[in-house]
């Protein structure tokens, strides 16, 4: 059975506990995953190599939060050995002082031009329909925080969104990846930016994208 460490919590504005109960844990159940839940970042100090997937919905309360060197080594070492990473939304704004964490994840949140918590309408376009993570996923519209991010050019981009100049005129027409995959050693990483509110994640295309992303990222052999 696929063993998952699910780390969630932190800043309550991203509603991590509601999302866990009503979205993430049911999805893990549908996938047949065995889940260990934790709201303690010190869980990353442990030996993580026994997990097949680490799911991240930790949300920073402060921009000055980071991982210790020991936590970075534990996390990156486990992924290099084959443990997968599945993360969404606020995970790209977590642990802002840990450069290695963001190197692993493949991106870092910079801004939501429409404002924090604003249900701003935008579209997400699938750019690779051939990947198993995007199978059956259509372009979709959401009303949420549109994440403008710094993104590793070596990511395999699955979906992107285009910004208007409504809030920052110089961003008009600029596109930013919103979902991607990447490899770290023998481990796989999946990230999706959508998910400020529960109803964002419950969009059928978002749910399908993430469910397939979770399955793709998890270690394939034991």
Image: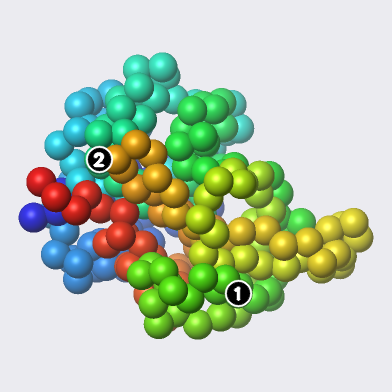
Which circle's residue, 2 or 1, is located before the other in the chain? 2
Judged left or right of residue 116, residue 78 is: left
Q: Nearer the viewer, residue 130 or 179?
A: 130
Tell me the quarter of the picture where residue 215 sits: bottom left
Q: Nearer the viewer, residue 34 or 222?
A: 222
Q: Secondary structure at mark 1?
A: strand
Question: Which mark is drawn over residue 82?
Answer: 2
Does any portion of residue 27 appear in the rendered image? yes
Where the N terminus falls, by quadrant? Answer: bottom left
Label 2 element class: loop
The location of residue 197, given as percent across then percent down, is 51, 65
Q: Check residue 76 in the rendering and tell me which mark sits there, or answer none.
A: none
Q: Which residue is mark 1?
A: 125
In the rendered structure, the answer to whether residue 190 lies left or right of residue 55 reads right
Q: Position of residue 202 (x, y in %)?
A: 42, 75
- Above or below — where is 140 with respect to 166? below
Whether residue 196 is visible: no
Q: Residues within 10 Å of mark 2 (few under 14, many from 20)?
A: many
Q: Please state the horizontal and vertical placement of residue 220, each as a whole percent of the image.
A: 19, 53
């Amino acid at each position: 059975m696929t063993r998952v460490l699910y780390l969630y919590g932190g800043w309550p504005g991203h509603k991590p506990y509601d999302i866990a109960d009503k979205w993430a844990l049911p999805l893990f159940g549908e996938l047949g995953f065995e889940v260990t839940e934790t709201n303690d970042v010190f869980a990353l100090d442990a030996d993580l190599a026994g997990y097949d997937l680490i799911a991240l919905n930790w949300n920073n309360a402060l921009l000055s939060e980071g991982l210790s060197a020991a936590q970075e080594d534990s996390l990156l070492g486990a992924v290099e050995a084959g443990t997968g990473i599945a993360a969404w939304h606020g995970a790209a704004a977590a642990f802002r002082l840990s450069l290695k964490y963001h190197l692993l994840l493949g991106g870092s949140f910079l801004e939501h031009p429409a404002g924090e918590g604003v249900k701003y309408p935008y579209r997400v376009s699938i750019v690779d329909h051939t990947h198993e993570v995007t199978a059956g996923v259509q372009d979709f519209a959401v009303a949420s925080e549109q994440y403008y991010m710094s993104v590793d050019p070596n990511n395999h981009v699955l979906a992107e969104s285009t910004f208007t100049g409504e809030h920052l005129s110089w961003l008009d027409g600029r596109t930013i990846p919103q979902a991607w995959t990447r490899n770290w050693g023998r481990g796989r990483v999946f990230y999706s930016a959508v998910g400020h509110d529960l109803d964002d994640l419950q969009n059928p295309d978002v749910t399908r994208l993430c469910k397939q992303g979770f399955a793709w990222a998890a270690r394939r052999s034991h």
